[in-house]
Amino acid sequence: MADVSLRQLELFAALPNFTTLSAAAAHLHISESALSQAVTGLENAVGEQLCVRRKARGLTLTPTGQQFAKQARQILADTKELVLGARRGQELRGPVKLGCYSSFATSVVPELLEGFPRRHPGVHIEIMVGTNEELLSALEAGRLDVALLYNVSLPFGYRRRKIYATELEVHLHPDHPLAAASTVDLADLATEPYIQYDATPGIRNVTDAFTARGLEPRIKAQVTQISLVEALVGRGVGYGLLMSRPNALPTSIEGRPFVIRPLDPPVTVSHVVGIWPEDMNLTPRASALLDFAVEKLGGYGGADVLSNPATSDGTVASAPIP
């Protein structure tokens, strides 16, 4: 059997992130011919075609190539952990690549970036903030160790750990007639102007909630930033429906107050969870970061509402979301 080097695995593991061999070579700081030779060497060792290279159509990995790249990433990650483990003894050292869903990033990332390095000064956190689709793609490509997302409409194939409980809440101007109530019924909002947070899974959460009651929201504006939803609510333009978040103050970016009320009956009661591919092992650093997140944020939001069965390591097994 032909020898395969870690450098060959490193080069091939990066290919799923690129549509052409030349783009991959430029990113990897290697000539296109050298990268092509490395791929050919791997194909000769494996005895099977791993990718299709066409100048007009770019780069496409075969099914075998996709699986090979995935296993190569795991081998590289395990090798890195082996070296780091030998160096550090009992001290955690090295990077953690953390993804965070954009809508609650400002509520959780500062807590983690401030506190975790104090406890583990040898660990460096790299943050990626993005949409569900961007974070899931990055996890699948091996560009993230773990991502924090809402436990709603997630695909199969991921392990999960609960971080904190969350539910949909209504944001109102202080002078709104419903602001004086302790809770708000969704039916009382149907005729009111609604400022929609235009992002997945938020749109689906709200649409499903209204549909379940035979109602339809009267959308006044659709915006892609939570801070803009809050600013418009603070000016009395309409009401907002947002998932509850830790460390969030009832004040808009303009300094205008608004009122947050729970919905009764409750709507979209869920969790923010840390997820990672079920065929990948969490590094000790990523596991410690999730421990820290649970410690600092886990008391927010009240009772446990995630029904997926826990595994022996304290994580939550992947399961369909109702």
Image (cartoon, rainbow, N blue to C red):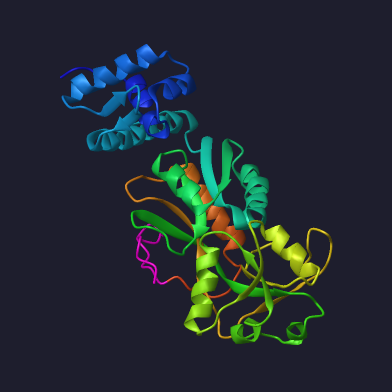
Counting every numbered tag in the picture gives 0
309 to 22, vertically: above or below? below
> Which residue occupies 49% across, 50% down?
147
Residue 16 place in picture, x, y as percent: 37, 34
Q: Which image quarter is the N terminus in?
A: top left
The residue nearer to you, when weighing 300 against 103, is: 103
- From the viewer's side, name the closer residue of 71 and 88: 71
Question: Is residue 129 placed above or below 232 in the rendered structure?
Answer: above
Any magenta on residue 317?
A: yes
Residue 9: quadrant of the picture: top left
Quick one: quadrant of the C terminus? Answer: bottom left
Would you place residue 191 above or below residue 292 in this image?
Answer: below
Q: Residue 170 in the image: x percent, y percent?
A: 66, 75
Asked whether residue 160 is drawn in magenta, I would say no
Q: Give the residues drawn in magenta, as a range.
A: 307-322
Q: Nearer the viewer, residue 54 or 123?
A: 54
Q: Position of residue 237 (x, y in %)?
A: 76, 70
Could one spot residue 162 in this view of the protein? yes
In depth, the one of 125 and 203 nearer the eye is 203
At a point 43% along the width and 45% down the height, the residue shown is: 137
